[in-house]
Amino acid sequence: MIQRQSISHLRPAVLIVIENVPLARDHRARKQVQSLEAGYEVSVVCRSHPDNRRCVDLPGVHLYEYPSPRDGSSTLSFVWEYSYSWFATSVLALRAFARHRFRVIQIGQPPDISLFLAAPFKLAGC
């Protein structure tokens, strides 16, 4: 009999990057994750939020969260928030790739410069 853990490594893997919001607050992304988990191993990178916990119980879903930066009102605080989020997302995407070897990346909310996040993974065959 095959153990559950070994089955998940046979499933194709997908990375979903959600920019600027937690998974729990992105209705469309939650529906996509729920649909994909039926046949794929799904890694999600997003901002942390207590409501994200309900998404962790789905089999084959791996949640990689980073703490939200402080909100600010100046241009400099916006640049800091965006830079911090992009860097945290990049680190977590690398961690997800090392663990799950995803072959597909979906970036949403909107892609903006996170498109450049996918470039190294394209070189790795994604």
Image (cartoon, rainbow, N blue to C red):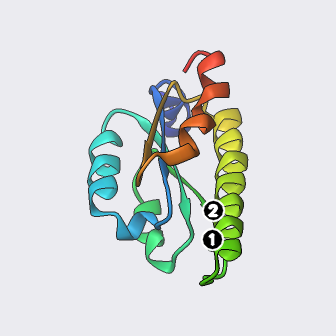
Task: Identify the residue at horizontal 71%, vertical 73% (top origin).
Answer: 76
Q: Secondary structure at mark 2?
A: helix
Q: Residue furthest front?
A: 75
- Gap between marks 2 and 1 measured at Cα: 6 Å
Q: Are marks 2 and 1 in contact (CB under 8 Å)?
A: yes
Residue nearest the viewer, comparing 40 with 6: 40
Provide the residue designation for mark 2. 82
Indicate the amino acid at tag 1.
Phe
Location of residue 28 by image quarter: bottom left
Residue nearest the viewer, comparing 31 with 107: 107
Residue 78 shows which numbered tag?
1
Left or right of 44? Residue 36 is: left
Left or right of 46? Residue 67 is: right
Q: Position of residue 112 (x, y in %)?
A: 50, 47
Q: Position of residue 88 (x, y in %)?
A: 70, 56
Residue 87 shows which numbered tag?
none
